[in-house]
Amino acid sequence: MEISLKPIAIVKNQRTSLSDDYWGNVISEIELLDHITADAFNGIEAFSHLEIIFYFNESDKSKIVLKGHPRGNKKWPEVGIFAQRKKERPNAIGLTIVELIKREGNKLWVKRLDAIHGTPVLDIKPVMKEFLPAVEIKQPQWSVELMKEYWK
């Protein structure tokens, strides 16, 4: 089975190169592409947070991995790709929950989107607390260490 997706928007921000950390102060503009009208954003301002689904278009497809040490750090355990959020994934899809700052016409401004300038957006969904886990989230200590500088 093959799936074909068409981007709905493009990310615009100051980050032009791939980097693993310091995404906390990044403000991104998400602009709808011409085939999606601004009406698609109607009502979005009522939500504080959005899920942005995007395509890692700059990732090197020849470097896709199925397992490895996160960020190549041998101090951390070797885990499968689905136990990490690495960009070198089989389908190169990213997902981030962002804070919505504002909307103007066919544009959104969001905070904490870890996608570089020019990244294609595949979909946008509002965050509803009923879709979030109703129990405590569990994660290994290595992932806490990995994320220490990510949102600074």
Image (cartoon, grey):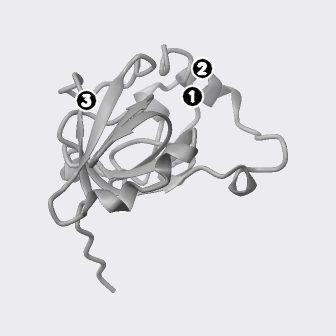
Instruction: Name which residue type carries label 1.
Output: Trp
- Label 3's element? loop
Instruction: Name which residue type carries label 2.
Output: Glu
Residue at left offset 48%, top offset 50%? 44
- Label 2's element? helix
Q: Mark 2 and mark 1 in contact (Cβ < 8 Å)? A: yes
Residue at left offset 48%, top offset 21%? 150
Q: Residues within 10 Å of mark 2 (few under 14, many from 20)?
A: few
Give percent across and percent down for residue 24: 45, 19
Q: Please indicate, yes or no, whether residue 90 appears anywhere in the rendered image.
A: no
Between marks 3 and 1, how big is the CA–CA gap?
22 Å
Q: Nearer the viewer, mark 2 or mark 3?
A: 3
Give percent across and percent down for residue 2: 29, 82
Mark sitting on residue 145: 2
Mark sitting on residue 76: 1
- Label 1's element? loop
Q: Please indicate, yes or no, whether residue 125 appears anywhere in the rendered image.
A: yes
Give percent across and percent down for residue 64: 30, 52
Instruction: Name which residue type carries label 3.
Output: Leu
Q: Vertically, is 130 above or below 13?
A: below
- Whichever of labels 3 and 1 marks the residue nearer the N terminus, that label is 3
Q: Which of the two residues, 70 or 91, is positioned nearer the viewer here?
A: 91
Question: Circle 3 is placed at which residue position?
Answer: 18
- Whichever of labels 1 and 2 marks the residue nearer the N terminus, that label is 1
